[in-house]
């Protein structure tokens, strides 16, 4: 698994500082990256620690603990989205491209947690259009629901 928190402020001795990776100005795809960090991945570990800004040491409003998230390929701490948003922090290009390519592939404005439904047309007699449950990070399945033609009482 590839850690996205390879910054000295996260305890990575050979990492770079958040200060050195921050940009003065926002970048076009920042909100998609922030949305992914906030909404995607599964919690794999919780640290009983108050979330604080790693540069100012001030408490981060809305975060009550630190959670480690993973999507199976990447991992990140729950406060990383805050730092990306506040300091225009750039993450590794490979990760940014990974998020942006997923968003393009599924024609999404922003990636989001959980499943979404696509209604498909089908020629299968006796069935209504299927509901495709697609979880971006995991797997997908297609379900065709039978048409209810009459009800016996």
Image (spheres, rainbow, N blue to C red):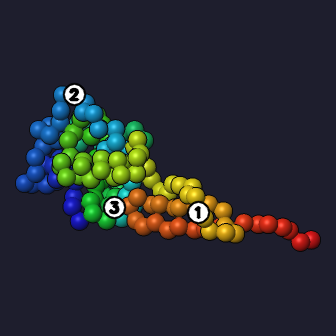
Q: Which residue is mark 3?
A: 71
Q: Earlier in the sequence, mark 3 or mark 2?
A: 2
Q: Does 117 sit left or right of 69 as displayed?
A: right
Q: Which residue is mark 2?
A: 25
Q: Earlier in the sequence, mark 1 or mark 3?
A: 3
Give how far across and how far down residue 152 sits, in percent.
Answer: 89, 72
27 in relation to 152, above or below? above
Q: In terms of image quadrants, where is residue 120? A: bottom right
Residue furthest out toward the top: 25
Q: Secondary structure at mark 2?
A: loop
Task: Give the number of the mark in front: 2 or 1.
Answer: 1
Q: Secondary structure at mark 3?
A: loop
Q: In terms of image quadrants, where is residue 121? A: bottom right
Q: Residue at x 21, y 58 (%)?
A: 3
Gap between marks 1 and 3 measured at Cα: 32 Å
Q: Secondary structure at mark 1?
A: loop
Gap between marks 2 and 1 measured at Cα: 48 Å
As drawn, the label of residue 36 is none
**Which quarter of the rendering shows the N terminus?**
bottom left
Q: Which residue is mark 1?
A: 122
Residue furthest out toward the right: 153
């Amino acid at each position: 698994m590839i850690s996205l928190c390879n910054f000295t402020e996260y305890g990575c001795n050979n990492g770079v500082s958040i200060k050195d990776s921050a940009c003065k100005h926002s970048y076009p795809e920042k909100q998609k990256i922030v949305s992914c960090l906030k909404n995607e991945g599964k919690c794999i570990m919780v640290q009983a620690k108050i979330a604080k800004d790693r540069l100012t040491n001030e408490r981060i409003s809305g975060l009550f603990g630190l959670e480690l998230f993973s999507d199976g390929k990447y991992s990140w701490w729950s406060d990383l989205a805050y730092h990306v948003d506040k300091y225009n922090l750039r993450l590794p290009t490979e990760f940014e491209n990974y998020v942006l390519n997923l968003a393009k592939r599924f024609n999404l404005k922003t990636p989001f947690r959980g499943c979404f439904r696509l209604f498909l047309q089908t020629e299968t007699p006796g069935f209504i259009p299927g509901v495709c449950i697609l979880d971006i990070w995991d797997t997908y399945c297609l379900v065709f629901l039978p048409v209810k033609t009459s009800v016996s009482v």
